[in-house]
Image (tube, rainbow, N blue to C red):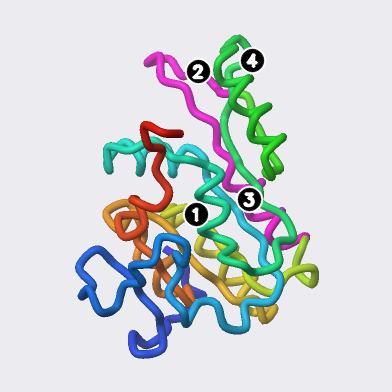
Amino acid sequence: MYNSKVYIPKQNLNILETNSSSSEINQNPHSQLPKVDRLNRGRIAIFIDGANLFYAALQLGIEIDYVKLLCNLTSGARLLRAFFYTGVDPTNEKQQNFLLWMRHNGYRVVTQELTQFPDGSKKADLNVKIAVDMLKLVGCYDTAILVSGNGELAYAINAVSYQGIRLEIVSLRSMTSDSLINLADSYIDLGIIQEQIKKTNSN
């Protein structure tokens, strides 16, 4: 529980969720973010929690097209950098090829080797790296787009917001902590934009 949360009244927060009315949703596939989000965004920096996005995509039953995702998130704004954070298994050749592709297609990939636990599960905790990068780059960007629903990042983004940075959260609503939504200037449910960011048979 973070005692330093800043709660933003709902009327001041732009929220786009799967239960929004059709009039609230921009239907143009080449114009993905709500128009209000395009105003005064300045230079943006994107921070993607790879594991969180992967499991969100599983819940939606889609595979992410990362070129479409990057175009959707930037939506014509000036991009400083797009970070993609993920745990890695050095012996997984398919994953290594995917990360190489990501590096060649506009992403700065930040990795941490997976730790195996006694129960056989594997995990990499990249929250510290996400938080450090967000804070280190303050002054170089105007808007932070966090693609994650992990509430453990709330303290870090609260600190970033006190530096005058606009905060946009993009995540699946069922996997998004209320603490992140309460801190955000804008929240977009991945369920709303899934058709615009998923891989299709023609990809």
Q: Earlier in the sequence, mark 2 or mark 3?
A: 2
Marker disc for residue 116: 2
Label 1 vs label 2: CA separation?
A: 25 Å
Q: Could you tell me how far apart the alpha carbons at marks 3 and 1 are, in whole angstroms?
A: 11 Å
In space, the residues marked 2 and 4 are separated at their CA atoms by 13 Å
Give the percent coordinates (x, y) of residue 66: 53, 42
> Which residue, given by chain and number where applicable, does mark 3 sit on?
130
Mark-to-mark CA distance, 1 and 4: 24 Å
Inspect the image, locate mark 3, and give the three-letter code of the amino acid beneath it.
Answer: Ile
Pointer 2 and pointer 4: residues touching (CB < 8 Å)?
Answer: no
> How far apart are the alpha carbons under marks 4 and 3?
21 Å
Q: Considering the numbered disc 4 on the image, is that residue within a helix, a strand or a loop?
A: loop
* Label 4 sits on residue: 90
**Residue at image location 30% in from the left, 55% down from the top:** 191
Q: Which residues are magenta?
A: 114-136
Which of disc 1 and disc 3 is earlier in sequence? 3
| Side of 163 relative to 26 (left or right) | right
Secondary element type, mark 2: strand
Label 2 to label 3: alpha-carbon separation = 21 Å
The amino acid pointed to by label 4 is Pro
Q: Residue at x 36, y 60 (%)?
A: 177
Circle on res. 172: none
Image marks 1 and 4: residues in contact by CB distance under 8 Å: no
Is residue 121 shown in magenta? yes
Q: Nearer the viewer, residue 5 or 13?
A: 13
Ranked by sequence position, the earlier of labels 2 and 4 is: 4
Q: Amino acid at mark 1?
A: Val
- The crowd level at tag 2 (other Cα within 10 Å; few <14, some 14-19, many 20+) is few
Q: Residues within 10 Å of mark 3 (few under 14, many from 20)?
A: many
N-terminal-most mark, 1 or 2: 2
Which residue is at the front of the view, 188 or 180?
A: 188
Name the residue that disc number 1 marks. Answer: 147
